[in-house]
Amino acid sequence: VNDGMLPLMAYDWGGDRGALAGIDQRIAEAQGDKKQLKEIEKDFLEVLQSDAKLPAKEYVCRQLAFIGTGRSVPVLAKMLYDEDLSDGARFALEGIPGSSVDKALRAALEKLDGDRRVGIVNSLGERGDRKAIPALSKMQNGPDKELSAAVETSLRKIAAHTEHGPAGHGRGDR
Amino acid sequence: MESKSGKHKTGGVISRRTFIGRAAAVAGAFSAPAIIPASALGADGHTAPSNRITVGQIGLGRMGVGHLRHLAHHASVEILALCEVDRTRLDDGKMALEGLYAKKIENGTYRGCDYYNDYREMLARDDIDAVMIVTPDHWHTPQSIHAVESGKDIYCEKPVSMTVDEGRQLVDAVQRNGRVFQNGSQYRTNPAIRRACDFIRKGGLGTIKSVFTLWGSLGGMLGAERFGPYAASLNATVTGRSMTTLDFALPGEPVPEGLDWDLWVGPALSRPYNPAYHFNPSRIVVPWSFCEDFGVGPSTWYHSHSMEVLQYALGYEESGPVELIHPSSKEFPTLTYRYANGVLIHLVEGWGQVKELYGAVPEDARLDGNFGGVVVGERGWLTTMSDNAGITGGPEELMAEYNSPAHDVDLGGKDHHANWLECIKTREKPHSHEEIGHRAAALGHLTMIAYKLGRSLKWDPVREVFPEDEQSNRLLRRAKRAPWHT
């Protein structure tokens, strides 16, 4: 792992948040610089694939929601199946543009259950993924009321995105 | 730019159920008397129970108990349910309510209250008309949306959202379900503040040149004694300089007995319990607000209040600026909003900066208080704050005009709660309806983004996007922990 990521490798519950200020700064200064952002993303993916602790990996996920690209998707997609990391992975994936994210979420939808499946349903709705409609529709009105409610909301959001554009691309003029 | 307040009605006229039907549906803590006294039927000047607005309240922290006391004094209200994930606070709320309703309990005119840990069970009741939401910030939008989808009208503490997108979803949900929503910005219904805002709106200051309001760093909060045990994790020397909230990872401690910590965390990423998020040492502290998962820092502390008042004064309460100008641009010494008509709102860390950095008011100008700002026009200056010094301004001729009876305001003696309750009956828009609350909160989120990125941003207040700035637009929203959704 890159030396600049060492504070993250040591970060755990009770860890010094101030020690991450340098990474915060590096991200802020890299805006508009694709090469720098690519380097940071690469470093972050190494952290995600290391034995770094949960707060460190969730810090990375928050940042990837902002700077992540398709390069992050395979690593994050695997995390969807991890009970501890699934939510963090969705935090990142929901922010990353591109069809590879939707594809990864749809694949996980079929394989997961419980809260993690509900989370995938929610993320597909937030992203307005029309290709998820057939799979989501099959889950409507099922015995799991929480899942059914999530599916209903998700389908409504997909319909709204279809009409008005996806989240983050103008919702105030409805 | 004209406010829509009071001009539009909200659909979904409140359904009046019969008293008997309601009473039968409620398994309250107090049993109904065998003989119903005249006061219960609306005699003796009392509001008959069937005409009362039945309310459930979510959140019984220090602000929550304050709201409870205020609401219980309204004759048109009957509080039927209290909800809190901390059993100690729920017990305190129960004791407070029984004291507040002691006379009604004694004379048999109170139907009783039920107590809940999970707000969803409370929202499932069809005998509750309206819900008061006084929870940490990260719950405001989810609970509001779930409540309007359950057919309830809402009073929600500010800021109403954690992100711009969440706020827009809230507005959509309130309007889609035809509910009445009041943002808990009580200064908006304060006669002194209203007078100042109306004076400015009517051109009393002439053309507005600049406006000032507060935004401070995290250090203002993290220096508090209560954070002492977690100093190593918080590292206030470094993080205290941050102008945004941060994702702190405080050490885990045992969850207090009776606290449903998982439900407290709700839609935020899971984390171990730490009392710094939850324990509230005094009435005015919002303990969670330094952590980006639970609060919005200065927006929670005062900015969402201030911006609602100031955007109302400027006629932009349902809109927003077109640009956020970061100090790194060197155009202004502090972060500044530019509106479409050219008006500038400068954020300052203390009122002294209005004089020292901008020279915008005379040296002897008295600037004091919070939850508003200083408005400078071609004819003079005026504050929109009622704390400490009250409304101040200058020059003397302007203040003489300002204080004349011609500028009296008549709110009919209505406070913010009363305005909400009246609108529940009339279906009018309250003073601080959902769009206004959203726009005030959204400005706090935009400010956070500009500080996080360290650069200026163009903003489209109609579409609510940063034009041609895909990277920044990603910060307008945030995912939620499963299974929570809005």
Image: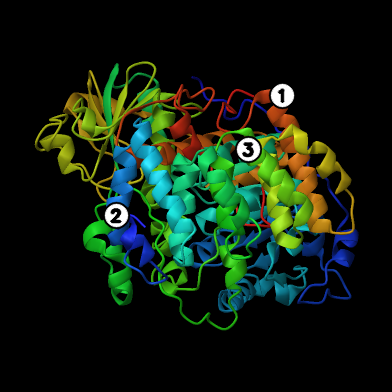
Chain assignment, label 3: A
* Residue located at (35% from left, 34% from top): A35
Q: Are marks 1 and 3 in contact (CB under 8 Å)?
A: no
* Residue located at (90% from left, 60% from top): B21
Q: Measure the C-alpha gap from mark 3 to mark 2.
A: 29 Å
Chain assignment, label 1: A
Please name whichever residue, B121 or A149, is drawn nearer the observer in this view of the structure. Answer: A149
Establish whether labels 1 and 3 are both on one chain: yes
Name the element at disc 2: helix
Q: What is the number of the mark on residue A4?
A: 2
Give the residue type at disc 3.
Answer: Ser
Indicate which disc, 1 or 2, sits on the residue closer to the N terminus.
Answer: 2
Q: Measure the C-alpha gap from mark 1 to mark 3.
A: 22 Å
> Would you identify the image quadrant in which residue B84 lies?
bottom right
Please name whichever residue, B314 or B146, is drawn nearer the observer in this view of the structure. Answer: B146
Q: Measure the C-alpha gap from mark 1 to mark 2.
A: 44 Å
Please name whichever residue, B247 or B19, is drawn nearer the observer in this view of the structure. Answer: B247
Residue B373 spot, x, y in % from top left? 30, 38
In this figure, which residue is indicated by the disc labeled 1?
A: A163
* Residue located at (49% from left, 19% from top): B1
Q: Are marks 3 and 2 in contact (CB under 8 Å)?
A: no
Residue B252 spot, x, y in % from top left? 45, 76
* Residue located at (62% from left, 71% from top): B97
In this figure, which residue is indicated by the disc labeled 3?
A: A100
Indicate which disc, 1 or 3, sits on the residue closer to the N terminus.
Answer: 3
Q: Is residue B350 above or below residue A85?
A: above
